[in-house]
Amino acid sequence: MTGDKPEEFDPIEEPAAEEAAGAPAAEPEPEVVPPTVEEQLAERTADLQRLQAEYINYKRRVDRDRVLVKAQGEAAVLRSLLTVLDDIGRADAHGELEGGFKAVADSLQQAVKSHKLEAFGEKGDEFDPRLHEALFHAGESADVTTTTVDSVIRTGYRVGEDVIRHAQVSVIDPATETEEAEPATQEPANDETE
């Protein structure tokens, strides 16, 4: 390669501007028609309507979340007061709720009632697993027709339909009937008489 003569390159000739202008174009570009005023107005109106709908949905969601957060905050505060209410109930049951302490207890109970806190779980109530937590079975009784609360170990509380704390109870079932056993013993007696 040392003895070879370097290759000569031909300069690239660029077409002159005049030649390019005179050459026919491969494809003419389509002419862009500007939108009419009515089309522009319709487009802007649709944009505003979408924006307004998004804002309304946002406002509804924020309002719903605000109510939910408030309810959760109230429930947390009420839940923290349940042990105090239990102590007040026990003091009242033992006759120790007197004087100034009774006035404080009454004020507290009125305050929680204003937040719609409601106690539930009484002896004789029909057992409802959505409201009651059965800790033990107390047996059977002919006095009841459905599974019933026999005794309340810890009172339950709710705000509206939301259960803050389930009532802990013992339950009693209706007595099972022994009629199935009796006809079997009576049939042989009927056969002997015939």
Image (tube, rainbow, N blue to C red):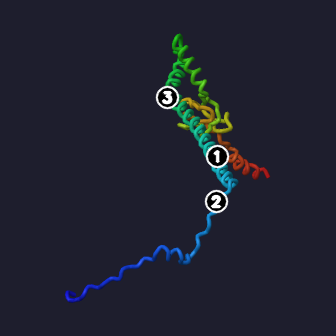
Label 3 – label 1 distance at C-alpha: 41 Å
Label 2 – label 3 distance at C-alpha: 68 Å
Q: Position of residue 107 (x, y in %)?
A: 56, 17
The three-letter amino acid code for the residue at tag 2 is: Pro
Which residue is at 55% across, 76% downward? 25
Q: Label 3: state its secondary structure.
A: helix
Q: Residue furthest right?
A: 194
Q: Is residue 85 above or below residue 174?
A: above
Residue 53 circle label? 1
Q: Position of residue 159 (x, y in %)?
A: 60, 31
Q: How many marks?
A: 3
Quadrant where the N terminus sits is: bottom left
The three-letter amino acid code for the residue at tag 3 is: Ser
Q: Which residue is mark 2?
A: 34
Residue situated in front as seen by the camera: 30 or 51? 30
Which of marks 1 and 3 precedes in the sequence?
1
Is label 3 in contact with label 1 (beta carbons under 8 Å)?
A: no
Q: Which residue is mark 3?
A: 80
* Number of other residues with Cα within 10 Å of mark 3, as a class: few under 14, some 14 to 19, many 20 or more: few
Q: Is residue 120 left or right of residue 13?
A: right
